[in-house]
Image (tube, rainbow, N blue to C red):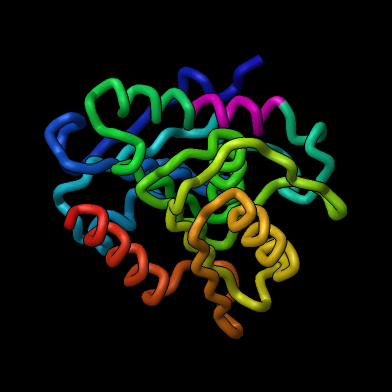
Amino acid sequence: MEPHVGQPIETTGRPLGEGRAVMIMIHGRQAAPVNILQLVDSLSQPEFTYIAPAAANNTWYPYSFMADKEQNEPGISSGVAVIDGVVSDVVNKGIPKDHIVLLGFSQGACLTAEYAVEHADRFGGVILYSGSVIGPPGTTWAYGGSFDGTPIFMGCSDVDSHVPLERIEEGAAVFERMGAIVTKRIYPGMGHQINDDEIAFTQGLMRNLLA
C-alpha cells in the first residue's frame, strides 16, 4: 500500500531543468505543499526550482516520529518512496544530487531525515527544521552509504514539545558517522517554529551551492 504515491506535487521557481539547483520541500503534519512553499519568498533564491510533494490527508504518518516504526507504516515507507521518486525525476532532468537540497519542517523534517539516512549520498544539503531521525528510544541507526561531506543543518528549540533535544543529538551523531558536516543550532525558548537565523543559514547554503 502506497498512500502518498500519486498525490499532487507542487512546483515553483525556475522550471525544472532550466534552473541550476533544486530544493525538495517536505511539509509538516496537517499541512500541505502550499504551507512549506511559503518559505520560498524568504529564501530569495530565484535560480532554484522548488518542489513540494503532498501527503495523503495532509499527514505523512499517524503517530509520533518516536513511536515504534511499525505503527507509522505504511506512511513512512510511502513518504520515503515519494521523495525518492522526486529525486529520480530531478536527476533525470540533468540536475546532479550535489545540486539538490532536501528541506523539511517538523514531521516533514523527520521524513526527510529518514529518506536521507536510507539514501545517503553527496547532496547539496539537508535542512531539518525541528526534526530528526525516526525511531523509538533505544533505536540503533545502522545504515550503509556515505553523505561524503553533505552539509546537514539541524535547528530546534530547547523546549520543543514534539522533538526532545536528545533526539537532535542522536540524529547529529548518526549523520556525522555517515560522513555529513553537521551544523546544529538550539534556540532557547523558541517553541515549534522556524526562525530568521534558520532561514539565514539556509540562504547561505543555497548561495554557496550556486557559487
| Residue positioned 70% across, 70% down in the render | 165
Q: Position of residue 130 (x, y in %)?
A: 57, 62
- Taking depth in this image into account, of 31 and 13 the one nearest to the observer is 13
Placement of the N terminus among the 4 image quadrants: top right
Report the span colored magenta. Answer: 74-82
Q: Residue furthest bottom?
A: 188
Q: Is residue 162 above or below residue 109?
A: below
The mark total stands at 0
What residue do we see at 31% from left, 27% from top?
A: 91
Residue at 46% over, 44% down: 26
Residue sitting at 75 percent across and 68 percent down?
A: 166
- Give the quarter of the image for residue 89: top left
Pick the front one: 98 or 59:
98
Q: Measured along the vertical axis of the image, is residue 41 above or below residue 54? A: below
| Residue 163 shown in magenta | no
Residue at the top extreme? 1
Give left or right: position of 188 versus 148. Answer: right
Q: Nearer the viewer, residue 43 or 56?
A: 43
Q: Does residue 162 appear to the left or right of 9 in the view shown?
A: right
